[in-house]
Image: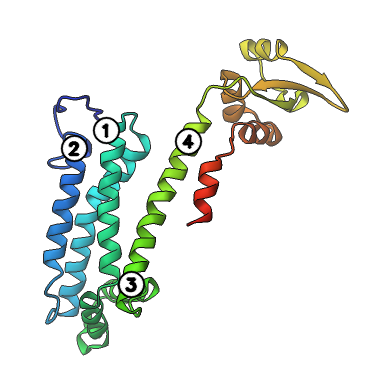
Amino acid sequence: MKYCQNLPCQGELLGIKGLVRAEDFPALASDAVNDSRERLTALDGSSPKELVTLVDGVSNNLCQIADAAELIRNVHTEEAYVSNASAAVQEVAGFMSEVNLDVGVYEPMRKAEASAEFQDMSLEARTVLHHMRISMEHEGIHLPADEKNECMELLDSEQQLSFEILNRQEQLRHQASEEGTWVPVESLAGFSGDLRGHLARLPRRGNISEEVLVPRDSMIADQILKTAPNPEARERIHMGQQKRDAVGEQNMVFL
């Protein structure tokens, strides 16, 4: 994977044609949406097989850029890539929500599934067409126009808020902290060498069983998460690394 700075990368990111810089994400998403919208404007008269092929092709076209953008906005370290990839995801997701509530797409599917030709299709093709129709019904294709618009707005807000909440939680988890987690010494049995030496120097307290205070953000905590055979030790470190996200909690109230 190539992470670009201000200048273009040598080559295309994730092997996607035209995806060289962060700013290419929204442009490619817009192109995919415009192309898909044009291909979905005249579905009447298509045979069931043609319908499945067309809709599947549109889905692949949209998902190629949307899946790449979803990956990049979750793993890239540069804000330009995160924001541009997020904008691409939002545009594609918004269009897909629009398509899922489009009677002009739904009616040809319903008619195709009820036609005699439908029975001559392969099991795979029949299954795809059937589930595409069912999916649109679950999305609310039966709703009045004003309720469809409200539904699309809510879906768009939910998708964006979900990403923001998860992204903020990940940032909080990686913030430096001197806080620690008390872990039973006996649950750390089996470590040796340098790690055992580090554990010996950590603060301890003795109750019913002796415990050691492991810094939340430390090499020792990472090693316990990755290699400790005792599940209680791993669980305590994992829970200790979580931080409350008051903003995210408030946003979830409005989802």
CA separation, marks 4 and 2? 24 Å
Q: Residue at x 33, y 76 (%)?
A: 141
The quarter of the displayed image where residue 133 is located: bottom left
Q: Amino acid at mark 3?
A: Lys
Could you tell me residue 199's position as x and y percent? 69, 15
Q: Residue at x 64, y 30 (%)?
A: 237
Depth check: give the residue in front, 207 or 99.
99
Regarding mark 3 in the picture, which secondary structure is present there? helix
Q: Residue at x 31, y 29 (%)?
A: 78
Q: Residues within 10 Å of mark 4 (few under 14, many from 20)?
A: some
Reading the chain from its start, which is encountered first: label 4 or label 2? Answer: 2
Regarding mark 1 in the picture, which secondary structure is present there? helix
Marker disc for residue 148: 3
Marker disc for residue 80: 1
Q: Amino acid at mark 2?
A: Glu
Q: Amino acid at mark 4?
A: Glu
In the rendered image, the quadrant that contains the N terminus is top left
Instruction: Give the residue pinned by disc 2.
Output: 23
